[in-house]
Image: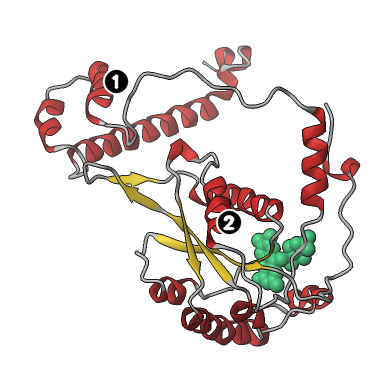
Amino acid sequence: MDALLNGSKLLGHWPSILGGLIIGLIIKYFTFLRTKKLRSSKKLPVDGKEQIQGLSNKSSTEYKKNYWKPALAEKPFVPFVPGNDLNPNGARHFYELVRGRRSIRTFNALKKPPISTIENCIRAAGTAPSGAHTEPWTFCVVEDPSIKSAVREIVEHEEYINYTKRMHAQWVADLRPLQTNAVKKYITDAPYLIIILKQTHGTTDDGRKKQHYYNEISTSIATGILLCALQAAGLCSLVTTPLNCGTALRRLLNRPDNEKLLILLAVGYAVKNCEVPDLVRKPLDDIMIKY
Ligand SMILES: Cc1cc2nc3c(=O)[nH]c(=O)nc-3n(C[C@H](O)[C@H](O)[C@H](O)COP(=O)(O)O)c2cc1C
């Protein structure tokens, strides 16, 4: 036996091979238990339950196809309608447009853009791609002064605690060049607040829970488009992420608890002599790597 073990390099590693086999079998056993539990769980459509009991592993693909119904309707594809032909100047013009966007913190309280402009910007945001086309976003547009005051009260209360207790000293120091603090006058001055909520899940037309995959990424992409649309409309904005204000703002706006605060966006026009931090953006070579 010794001679055999010494003679074969592979057999010389038998303890590792045996260990690997045992781990593999354990994993397979737990996967089997999990699948069994899932199949008998209440999540399974009732009419599918009895049938699955008689299904072998081979037909589980058939089972999945028949009983896990997609949230979207399964319809035939339609022809793709291309947008504009490739236009090199389009990108240049777009860059010229968006490079002028700055976060402003002093809004003109007396100048209000029409709601139709805000609506068109949100329409543009709603064209964003989303995980499995779940469109997991809600844009709450607030112009009522009493609601804006209530928002400000919530945010200032929390931000005072954030600045004095929750945020690390380094974080507070990093914000110093931006001259931000717990006083948020822009919340009541800006003619519109757009409170952007990500929906963690939704409901299908037939009342089932609908998973919202990548809801934060999808809503952030939509927000990026919204910022560009606002800029194209000649409006100014400020993206804010007030820490610990989510639940209070959601309750104030009477939104369901599958909707979570992502961004509080102030929108309007800048005051006449508005100033912004003197920031420099990274050059192309620092943000793009060609392969
Ligand atoms: C995710 C995110 C969170 C932000 N949160 C805040 C905030 O809470 N308060 C604030 O005054 N600005 C906030 N800002 C604005 C940034 O400070 C600002 O975008 C940055 O300083 C760059 O300036 P610019 O927008 O003028 O290019 C936030 C921006 C982003 C993208």
Question: Toward which corner of the image does residue 50 lie, by quadrant?
Answer: top left
Residue position for label 2: 117
- Classify mark 1: helix, strand or loop: helix
Position of residue 282 in the picture relative to residue 128 (left or right):
right
Where the C terminus falls, by quadrant?
top right
The three-letter code of the residue at mark 1 reads Thr
Does ligand 1 reach within 8 Å of label 2's beta carbon? no
Please rate how many residues cluster around mark 2, counting C-alpha atoms within 10 Å: few if below 14, some from 14 to 19, many from 20.
some
Q: Position of residue 86 (x, y in %)?
A: 74, 24
Residue at 10% x, 33% y is: 47
Q: Amino acid at mark 2?
A: Thr
Determine the residue positioned at 87% across, 51% down: 282
What secondary structure is marked by label 2? helix
Which is more toward the observer, 187 or 3?
187
Q: x, y (%) of residue 98? A: 77, 50
Q: Which residue is mark 1?
A: 61
Q: Position of residue 271 (x, y in %)?
A: 76, 76
Label annotation for residue 132: none
